[in-house]
Amino acid sequence: MKIAIMGAMVEEIEPLLENFKDYEEIVYGKNRYYKVLYKNSELYIAYSKIGKVNATLTASTLIQHFGCEKLLFSGVAGAIDSSLKIGDLIYASSLAQHDLDITIFGHPHGYVPEGGVFTNSSKELNNIAKEVAIDLKITIKEGIVATGDQFIASNEKKEWIAKTFNASAIEMEGAAVGVVCDALNTPFFILRAISDAADMDASFSFDEFLKSSAKVSAGFVISMVNKVAK
Ligand code: ADE
């Protein structure tokens, strides 16, 4: 089986490459993809660079060019749900684009004609995540994740996203990956470890905790790959 493991920033995939050690680097579409032979599977690891456009390109390349059949995303997010603390893990049950706005035509925020507001992730992969959390004796939360091309560092904006999408966490790639995977019939899983609270201190918190939270997320995904790879 070919499995994609994707992050947005180099810090989000570095712990994966350090773990798997032996990889081949392939350059395609101005990006680097790292191929790892694992059990009877091939893993394709890449970071997209920040934002929905880059995430769309990388997810699409992983599936359409490299032939990946499942996609696992690992990275960090800002917490909207106040019970989520730095380093806590949350996977997306569904995702929405909070910055997509055609409300002037009477549609809800995040709505795309012929699409919808939310994209659901794979129940099968989410169940594997729950099993892994039990095995590792750690807590993982499930919730709606809101995605947009903005780093959110304001209580007002955060509250608006919470109210409008009932979201638990905020980041900048997940919903784009979801749209690609849904269109291409590829089961996907979006995992995030909290790096900040999307408030006025968010940029400082992000800088401080990006690496440690990215490592928590990557560690969990490594345990999942062990169960997913055939
Ligand atoms: N990723 C991590 N923290 C974030 C935030 N506050 N806003 C958007 N994306 C993020």
Image (cartoon, grey):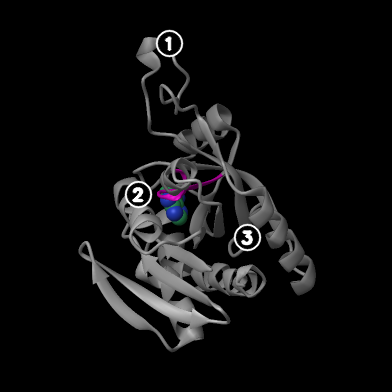
Q: Is the residue under label 3 in contact with that under label 2 (CB below 8 Å)?
A: no
Let me know if residue 40 is in the magenta part. no
Front one among 96 and 58: 58
Q: Is the CB atom of the residue marked by disc 1 within 8 angstroms of ligand 1's nearest atom?
A: no
Picture disc at residue 215: none
Q: Which is nearer the N-term, disc 3 or disc 1?
A: 3
Magenta-highlighted residues: 169-175
**Is residue 148 rendered to the left or right of residue 169?**
left
Front one among 204 and 124: 124
The residue that label 3 is drawn on is 89
**Is residue 225 rendered to the left or right of residue 77?**
right
x 45%, y 67%: residue: 210
Cα distance in 3D space between marks 1 and 2? 27 Å
Image coordinates for residue 160, horizontal then vertical, percent: 50, 30
Image coordinates for residue 150, horizontal then vertical, percent: 35, 44
Relative height, residue 2 to residue 151 (above, below): below
Q: Which is nearer the N-term, disc 2 or disc 3?
A: 2
Front one among 66 and 100: 66
Cα distance in 3D space between marks 2 and 3? 23 Å
**Quick one: SS at disc 1?**
loop
The residue that label 1 is drawn on is 106
Q: Which is nearer the N-term, disc 1 or disc 2?
A: 2
Q: Locate the C terminus and report the quarter of the image it occupies.
A: bottom right
Front one among 211 and 156: 211
Q: Amino acid at mark 1?
A: Gly
**Is residue 122 rendered to the left or right of residue 6?**
right
x 28%, y 75%: residue: 26
Image coordinates for residue 112, horizontal then vertical, percent: 41, 26
The residue that label 2 is drawn on is 56
**Quick one: SS at disc 3?**
strand
